[in-house]
Each structure stands twice: as structure tokens, then as C-alpha cells.
Image (tube, helix red, strand yellow):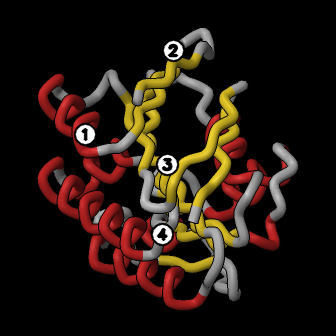
Amino acid sequence: MDYQLTVDGLDETIPGGTNILLVHPSTGETDRIDTEFLKDDTDHFFVISTRTTAREVSQKLEYYDVDETKAVILDTLSVERGYSRRSSKNVHYVSAPDDLDGIIEQTERFFDEYDGKLRVSFDSVTELAYYAGEDEAREAVERILELIDEHDAVGLFHLSDEVHDDDVEEGYRELFDRVIDLDVEGNVEFDD
């Protein structure tokens, strides 16, 4: 199965199983890239958020005019922070951002419940590493990449280039099929 990749003026076809790393500064505006990735040529998408709550994800989708009926959101923050939460068919929770088993289980559940063209957005690997540790985060990311590949989906994973050691960042760059570099001015560079 092929997918359109329509991000920041780029318009090309990518095969299912393709995973893209979005490398950005801590202050970088990633929402535009993320929502462009999710908006087109998809039946359902799964947003794994270790950086914002489900409510904030919904607000972002609404602001960028992304069809929320296609969204399934995994909120990893609200339970630990004691925020009120309302589970629904399209919003799920795990106990904390370092609940790696819960994150992977919810990802498997998404793939079990939905068919067609599926996309995954993981925002962010950096926050996951902050809560769970670098090695544990890397293992979880690798497992989710395997699931994306198994289910012929595509994924976009956020990573801040100001936080990780150079060797950790380089290891992630090598792990992904494509890399998008976003600078502080909002300029985008694509690497195959």
C-alpha cells in the first residue's frame, strides 16, 4: 500500500512501512508538519502524545483542520498529573509517560481495531526518553516501528536535536527510513 507524503511543499508517494523522523529544535513549531502528515490519504491515525494532553491534541487537530473522526489519541500525561479525563472510543490513557508496556499495548490495539491506510504520530521521542530513559525509549520506539511495518502503516516521530547526545540522535537518524530537519525559522530539509 502506498501513501501520499504531503509535507511543507513535498508531494510524493511513500510505501507502507515507511517511518519518518522529524528532528527539530526544542522551540520548533512542529504542529504544522505533524498535521500535514496526518491530514491526507489516511483512513485512521493514531497520535501517541508524551508531550501534550488529549485535549491539547484535539485542539491542534481542530486548529489545523484535520478530520478528528479519523483520530485515535493516546494521552500519557493526564492520569499522572491528575487531570480529569473522559475515555471514549477515540481517546485512551496510560498511567504515565514511562508506561512503555501500556503505550505499546495501545498501539497494538489501534492496529487490531482499524484497517486501511493508517498513520502514527509519536510526539515525542524526546519526552519519552526524559520520563523512561534513553535505552528504554529506544526499545519502545523500535517495537512501534516494527508494528508500523507489520501493518503496512506509516509513522512520524518527533525528536529534539538540542536534548540528546550526538550519538543518540545519530542512532535515531539511522533507524528511520526518512528524516525531516526543521530549523528554528521553520525551514524544512528532507533527507532520504
- Give percent across and percent down for residue 44: 68, 71
Task: State how far apart marks 4 and 2 are (Cα).
Answer: 30 Å
**Image point (47%, 29%), residue name:** 180
Q: CA distance from mark 3 to mark 4?
A: 14 Å
Cβ–Cβ under 8 Å for marks 3 and 2: no
Distance in Å between CA atoms under marks 3 and 2:
17 Å
Q: Mark 3 or mark 2: which comes first in sequence?
A: 3
Tell me the quarter of the picture where residue 75 sits. bottom right
Q: Nearer the viewer, mark 3 or mark 4?
A: 4
Mark earlier in primary sequence (4, 2): 4
Determine the image quadrant of residue 41. bottom right
Asked if 6 appears above or below 155 in the picture, the reply is above
- Residue 87: x and y in percent read 65, 85
Residue that extends furthest to the top in the rendered view of this protein? 185
Apparent side of residue 92 relative to residue 67 in the rendered image (left or right): left
Does dot 1 land on a helix, a strand or a loop? helix
